[in-house]
Image (cartoon, rainbow, N blue to C red):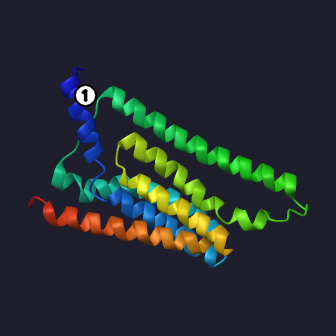
Amino acid sequence: MDDATSVFERVAFRSFWDDGLLDLMVGLVILVVGLSWWQGIAVYGAVFPAVCASLWHPLRKRLVEPRMGYVEFSGDRELKARSFRHALVAFFAGTAMFGAALFIIFRGMATPGAASWIAGLPLLLIGIPLLFFAAFTSCWRFAVYAGIAVLAGVDMVLQDLDPHVGLIASGTIILVSGIVMLARFLSRHPAEPQ
């Protein structure tokens, strides 16, 4: 692929994410996880990301593609995207195994001070993939979202609050950002009459 085509594809790939749908769904996931944690039904909140992930593509086909068309990227770009998705799955699976191992190791042990910093971990674990996604797509607002999540996690530690407070706050901020972006996108790009 020549340089001009490569640059064009890079710009197209970055703009592929500018409709706000993913922002809305990321914010909604974080918010629902926080609300379910707060209500003591965190198990249900843990299922919600998978539900949102399965809804993203049909929603994109219904809301975005009629307005902007379908984009097929080069095989190299698709391979990078697939590798990134596999890396995310490995990150979350590794995090879950690491958390389970720590639980088994420290079960029944007195760990003074652990509860104070553990409240920030869920938000840190959300911030890390958001930062990687920002680097992968060159959509730097996801780095801002990562910063919001990490700062909310630090705030949970400093104020000795439960993690759900930071999850709800950061999820709400990202959700509102996504709603505003999607509303702007939909108003700027009306659907073609059928």
Give the residue number, with chain letter if any, for mark 1. Answer: 6
Against 85, residue 51 (above or below) is below
Q: Residue furthest right?
A: 109
Q: Quadrant of residue 46?
A: bottom right
Q: Is residue 97 or residue 168 the one in the foreground?
A: 168
* Residue beneath the point at 16% across and 55% down: 67
Is residue 48 something one can see in this rendering?
Answer: no
Q: Secondary structure at mark 1?
A: helix
**Closest to the observer, 107 or 89:** 107
| Quadrant of res 161 | bottom right
Q: Is residue 56 left or right of residue 191?
A: right
User: What percent of the width, then of the height, locates residue 174?
Assistant: 41, 65
Where residue 16 appears, as percent x and y from the top left, is: 27, 47
The C terminus lies in quadrant: bottom left
Residue 107 appears in the figure: yes
For the point 67% across and 76% down, which residue is it? 40
**Front residue of 143 and 39:** 143
Q: Looking at the image, which residue is at 41% across and 54% down? A: 142
For the view shown, which residue lies furthest in the left direction?
Answer: 193
Q: Residue furthest front?
A: 158
Coordinates of residue 184 in the picture (x, y in percent): 21, 66
Instruction: Name the residue type under label 1.
Output: Ser
On screen, 2 above or below 175?
above
Q: Residue at x 65, y 59 (%)?
A: 121
Q: Position of residue 162 (x, y in %)?
A: 66, 74
Q: Quadrant of the N terminus?
A: top left
Task: Give the side of residue 126 with respect to residue 145, left or right.
Answer: right
Residue placed farthest to the bottom in the image? 39
Residue count near mark 1 (Cα–Cα under 10 Å), binned few <14, some 14–19, many ≥20: few
Q: Is 53 on the left-hand or right-hand side of 109?
A: left
